[in-house]
Amino acid sequence: MDGAGNGGRIRKMVFVTVGTTCFDALVKAVDSRQIKEALSKRGYTDLMIQMGRGSYAPSKVSEEDGPLTVDYFAFSPSIADYLKSASLIISHAGSGSIFETLQLGKSLIVVVNEDLMDNHQSELAEELAERKHLFYARPQMLQQTIETMDLETLVPYVPGTPKLVVDLMNKFLGFPTD
Amino acid sequence: MQLFLVLQEGKRGVFINLKGMGKVNDGILCFIFPIFVTIIVVRLMYVLYWVRKPNRSLRTDNLRTLIVLGSGGHTAEMLRIVNVLQKDRFAPRFYIAAATDSMSLQKAKVLEDSLIQQENSGRKMVEASQFIQIYRSREVGQSYVTSIATTLIALAHAVWLTFRIRPQVIICNGPGTCIPLCTSAFLFKLVGLGWSNIFYVESIARVRKVSLSGLLLYKLLLADQFYVQWPQLQKKYPRAQLVGCLM
């Protein structure tokens, strides 16, 4: 499909999410000129930011002021629709956001919040990055990650199942196995 | 037997002097106290022996199930497990979340409502699920001094809820809320007031280190079964069972 021309541009959306946390460092980084240019160079056309409890509000940018449109909101009961329509997701390291994204088969960059005191979240992101299910970056490295990432190298994540846990619980309790 | 509590003024202030009436009463005191302690120790050893022993007989009844929810990914993981549980075996279900956590109980209600709609008329009627809030032991960043008081309040509330719910199964995956509840359930086991099987599933976010709740339940032998999702943890905690990623 030819995406050239004013009205015929394929729209590729980048969705940024911080969950219910406050992660101003990520929102600021994504709203910077360098990152917006980097995203635009990689072919993205729209940037939607879910900023959570943060205090830094990005500047909205419309299509004429381009190259990237920018919009934001604080919370939503469900971000599933945004995740589904995005081509790239940049997320904080919360396990809920990570798995909701991976289960939709989307490309994901996880940025760890270094201001959090107990940073056990980075363990999960690092492990999944080692298994090539996502890219993992510090806020300062985000631009480089966007510029150099090769989405083809990502391995699709096969969702797990709680079936084994439930079987073990049943067995322990003495219920007949199905 | 009569014991007198005598308040004596000494150089360092007032202190309490326990006076027995003669040798007979001293004897009883020396006799009863050690027996009491022995009973508790024997009972504790009995409980610790039977904890983690699977049930050998075939079970057919339903079990009162307590499900502990928590903020962040905890509730999402827990509800994923509940989704797969046999609803007629694990019933009635009691969901507990911290008082300051508004979202978790709502999500559980959504799940339970969808189950009611799927229910066929052939199933036997069990009690409806309940959604309960518990006082929080410690808020993030709370000072340790005040945390002691709030933890005791949370423990008292947990004891009351355990008494009311009488759970036979407790499923939890890591939020601080589960510690007072599991401790309370263990105390009930200790005094013989009911036996609950405690299943702990360490969160998927814990790859190399267990959470504080997990560590307590593992080391203090409070959980009947301890499940981990990543192989690194199973190597580190040999009594844990590897169940793979749930998400």
Image: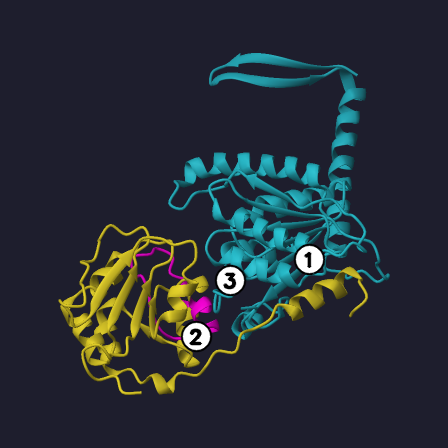
User: Quick check: is B127 in the magenta stretch?
Assistant: no
Do labels 3 and 1 touch, CB within 8 Å? Answer: no
| Residue at 45%, 62% in the rendered image | A96
Q: Nearer the viewer, residue B146 or B206?
A: B206
| Residue at 43%, 83% in the rendered image | A155
Which of the two labelled residues, at mark 3 and mark 1, occupies the earlier sequence position? Answer: 1
Q: Badge 2, how many Cα within 10 Å: few under 14, some, many 20+? A: some
Q: Nearer the viewer, residue B152 or B14?
A: B152
Q: Which chain is cyan?
A: B
Residue at the spot of label 3:
B210
Residue B118 tag number: 1
Q: Position of residue A170 (x, y in %)?
A: 74, 63
Q: Nearer the viewer, residue B164 or A42?
A: A42
Q: Position of residue B163 (x, y in %)?
A: 70, 37
Residue at the spot of label 2:
A127
Q: Is residue A131 visible?
A: yes
Distance from label 2 to label 3 (Cα)?
Answer: 15 Å
Closer to us: mark 2 or mark 1? 1
